Image: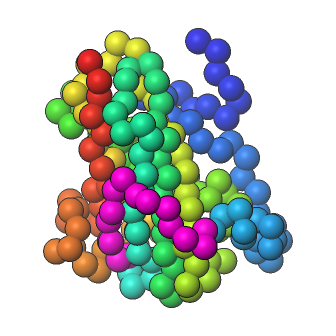
Amino acid sequence: MRLKPSTVLLPSLLLLGSACIVEAPGGASPAERRAATVAQVPPLSVRNGANLGGKVEIVGASVQPGRLTPGEQAKVTLYFKVLQPLEEDYLVFVHVEDADGRMERMNVDHPPAGGIYPTSKWRPGETVKDEFAIYLPPGASTRSLNIWLGLWEPRTDSRLRLTNPDAVRNDGRDRIFLAQVPVAR
């Protein structure tokens, strides 16, 4: 299999994402800010509403296609509504797990918005778009994949706390359930 430079190969899943992380001195340029934010959230296949630390709401996501076939990829687009300024630069942590527990969990931690717009530069009222792809290798035998996520600060190894755990599905450790993606047979 030939892989592009922007591809990360993991034992059970191939996860595609941006390999280039760009941070402009002093924050994102106006063009980068426009590329990383949306004026209006498009129709979502998954609504969420998780509130992280009173600072960010996970509005929801779209997963395309909505069913994953072994050997193909699904594109996940997340939307974060900024409620309050963030002092730290958090990573989006994404855990992709086999719903039946047969595959090892894949960690897909990454800077939001392809690395062009760190969380410490986010402005209240903005909605930040984050994209990544998951790929299930040919021959995988899982029936579905669960996607869990949140915001994680690597220096302190801490997650931004979920403030409304009764409103969204979570694991009690500030890890939010985003979606279950069925796998076609």
Q: Is residue 175 visible?
A: no
Write down the quadrant of residue 102 in the picture.
Answer: top left
Task: Give the residue at x 27% y 34%.
Answer: 182
Task: Give the residue at x 47% y 30%.
Answer: 73
- State the image coordinates of residue 12 (x, y, percent, origin top left): 39, 25
Write down the quadrant of residue 175 in the picture.
Answer: bottom left
Task: Give the residue at x 38% y 20%.
Answer: 70
In the image, farthest residue toward the front: 43
- State the image coordinates of residue 131 (x, y, percent, origin top left): 55, 51
Rendered view: 165 above or below 152: below
Taking 12 as reference, is 92 left or right?
right
Rendered view: 76 above or below 60: above
Q: Nearer the viewer, residue 66 or 121?
A: 66
Read off the magenta span. 38-52
- State the image coordinates of residue 159 (x, y, percent, origin top left): 39, 68
Q: Quadrant of the C terminus?
A: top left
Q: Quadrant of the N terminus?
A: top right
Image label count:
0
- State the image coordinates of residue 109 (x, y, percent, origin top left): 49, 50
Taking 87 as reference, is 150 left or right?
left
Membership of 46 in magenta stretch: yes
Q: Is residue 19 visible?
A: yes
Write down the quadrant of residue 176 in the picture.
Answer: bottom left
Membership of 1 in magenta stretch: no
Task: Give the residue at x 43% y 60%.
Answer: 43
